[in-house]
Amino acid sequence: MNLRSLLLLLMVTTVVSCKAPPPKMTDDTIVTSQVNGVTLTHRYVVTPPKEFNPVNDEYRALYPGSIMSKPDFGGKVLGALKTGDTYTMLGLVEQSWFAISATDNPQLLGYVPQRAMVVSERYDQALKSDRPRVKRAAKKTTCVAVDDSSKACQKGDSGTWILD
C-alpha cells in the first residue's frame, strides 16, 4: 500500500511540475515590441523596426500602395492602402519608411514608403499639384510673302493682317 501511494504521489508531482508548451505563434498572434523606448503592438507577421522615431500624425494615402510586413519591398504584402483614406503614421523607421496604423486602432498595421502618403492638411494641395496640366497649342501665325522684301502675317486671335 505504501509503495502504491508513493508511486501515485511521485506521478502527481511529475505531472504538476510540467509546464504547458508555449502557444504556437501564427501570423495573426498579437505581440508587443519595444523600440527606442516606444512600445509597439503588432501582429506576429509584422517585423518590428530596428529604428523608430515617433510621429503620431494623420496622413492620407495618395495611391493604393502595398502595406508591407517589413520596411522594404522584400517583405510580405499584408494589404493595400485605400486612396484618400486617413491613417495614423506612428513613426519613421529605417530606410525612410512609415510605420502606420488605422486611425481608430493604435496597432501597427505595417510599413509603406514615404511617397505613398502625405500629411492630411496637404492632401488636396498634393493632388492639385500632381494633376497633368493641359498644354495649350502654340498659336500659328499665318504669313504670306508680299514682295521680295516684305510679308503679311495674320494674328491668330483676331484675324487681323499685319504688314512687315
Image (cartoon, rainbow, N blue to C red):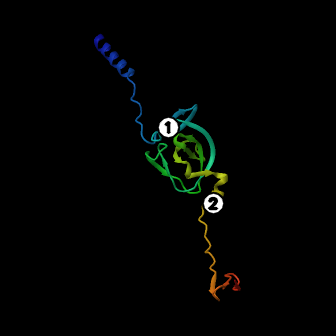
Q: Nearer the viewer, residue 161 or 42?
A: 161
Q: Mark 1 or mark 2, which is nearer the start of the sequence?
A: 1
Residue 81, position in %: x, y?
Answer: 53, 53
Extreme residue in the bottom direction: 146
Between 37 and 102, which is closer to the camera in this rendering? Answer: 37
Q: Position of residue 147 (x, y in %)?
A: 64, 89
* Mark 1 lies on residue: 48
Instruction: Give how far across and how far down residue 70 sits, in percent.
Output: 47, 42
Image quadrant where one finds the N terminus: top left
Image spot of residue 28 (x, y percent): 45, 42
Tag 2: residue type?
Ser
| The C terminus lies in quadrant | bottom right
* Element type at mark 2: helix
Q: Residues within 10 Å of mark 1 (few under 14, many from 20)?
A: many
* Image: 145 above or below 39: below
Q: Is residue 67 above or below residue 42?
A: below
Q: Is residue 118 left or right of residue 25?
A: right
Q: Which mark is residue 129?
A: 2
Furthest residue in direction top, as rendered: 2
Report the residue at 64% width, 45% height from top. Answer: 57
Task: Say which quarter of the image contains residue 145.
Answer: bottom right
Choose between 132 and 9: the one closer to the eye: 132
